[in-house]
Image (spheres, rainbow, N blue to C red):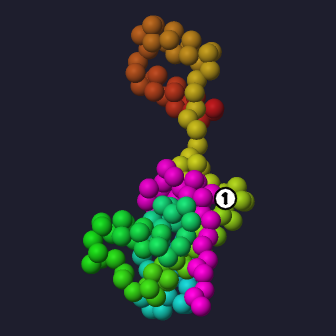
Amino acid sequence: MVNKERTHDNTAVQAALRNLSTVGALSDEAKTVLRNLIQNATYLGKNRVDESDVYAIVRNSDEISLEETRRCLYVARGGLESNTPSSRSSIEKYKRIALEVSTGFQELIASGTPMSFTAKLKPKHHMNEEQKLMMVELINAGTATQELIDLLAEMKKGK
């Protein structure tokens, strides 16, 4: 009798990663989770898996299973059969590490950590009405460009 394969629901992680097409778009915390899990996985042996392959599996799979892992690797490697691991044990390694990364990402999402590096960027400072009026008056009065630039820099510091 053959054991039924266990799959892992990955829809929450897939939704969080929807707009992040590469590993480089991840936040530092998410990259650290991904890299640490891959580096600390002793079952991978000395031939580690590529983080972009694991990320492609986690990002593009709504559930992590052997067949879905094989499909994602095939797509991530340009659709070339010769570049895709063919042995079941290789696919199982990718599935196992993808499952661990998915679980790590779920913990980050649950803790409220942003998955995108852009989420931590500071919003731009906008001028209030009083500052706008002052700038218009200075421009109409013929104030030198460098003085306007200095004033804007001062406004930015003062916020």
Quadrant that contains the N terminus:
bottom right
Q: How many marks?
A: 1
Residue 32 makes an appearance in the image = no
Q: Which residues are magenta?
A: 1-26
Residue 29 is drawn in which quadrant? bottom right
Determine the residue positioned at 46% across, 22% down.
148
- Horizontal relation, residue 133 to residue 113: left or right: left
In magenta segment, residue 79: no
Q: Is 25 above or below relative to 56?
A: above
User: In the rendered view, does 109 fall on the left or right side of 62?
Assistant: right
Please name whichever residue, 146 or 94, is drawn nearer the observer in this view of the structure.
Answer: 94
Residue at position x 36%, y 70% from top?
Answer: 74
Residue 12's image quarter? Answer: bottom right
* Residue 24, magenta (yes or no): yes
User: Is residue 50 something one can see in this rendering?
Assistant: yes
Q: Secondary structure at mark 1?
A: helix
Image x and y of residue 97, in percent: 54, 78
Residue lying furthest right in this view?
A: 111
Query: Is residue 53 rendered to the left or right of residue 81?
Result: right
Q: Nearer the viewer, residue 139 or 5?
A: 5
Q: Residue at (58%, 48%) from the top-left corner? A: 119
Percent of width and height locating residue 109: 67, 58
Q: Is residue 122 above or below residue 155?
A: below
Of the pair 80 and 109, the residue shown nearer to us: 80
Q: What quarter of the picture does the C terminus occupy?
A: top right
Image position of 146 with respect to 4: above or below:
above
Residue at numbered disc 1 = 109
Q: Residues within 10 Å of mark 1 (few under 14, many from 20)?
A: some
Nearer the observer, 43 or 40: 43
The amino acid beneath tag 1 is: Ile
